[in-house]
Image (cartoon, rainbow, N blue to C red):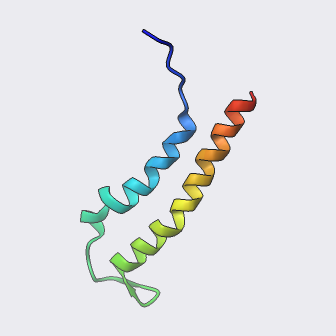
Amino acid sequence: MRNQRRRPALRWLLLPYVLFLAALPFVNRVTPTVLGLPFLFFWMLVATLATPLSVWLARRGDRKRGRA
């Protein structure tokens, strides 16, 4: 068996998947409205804005591990 390299920082990349797909059946509703948007649209907006953040956190963690 070869020695596998663990990269826990890449777990941040699961966040967009969870926000967009796994949680979708739970947030698929029109009411309540948040900031004048139906809840589902607001959820998609938050998920879209969180995606670059999670990619940045994964990259940052992976680069820190490479320097150590």
Q: Is residue 47 left or right of residue 24?
A: right
- Pick whichever, 25 or 31, lies toward us: 25
Picture residue at 48% right of the left edge, 68% below the top: 48
Residue 63 horizontal/vertical position (percent) = 69, 39
Residue 24 horizontal/vertical position (percent) = 29, 64
Which image quadrant for residue 22?
Answer: bottom left
User: Looking at the image, is 11 positioned above or below residue 48?
Assistant: above
User: Looking at the image, is 17 positioned above or below residue 39?
Assistant: above
Picture residue at 53% right of the left edge, 40% below the top: 10
Q: Is residue 17 left or right of residue 59?
A: left
Picture residue at 49% right of the left edge, 19% below the top: 4
Picture residue at 55% right of the left edge, 32% below the top: 7
- Pick whichever, 5 or 26, lies toward us: 5
Q: Quadrant of the N terminus?
A: top left
Q: Is residue 19 left or right of residue 67?
A: left
Seen from this angle, which residue lies furthest front?
2
Residue 45 horizontal/vertical position (percent) = 46, 74
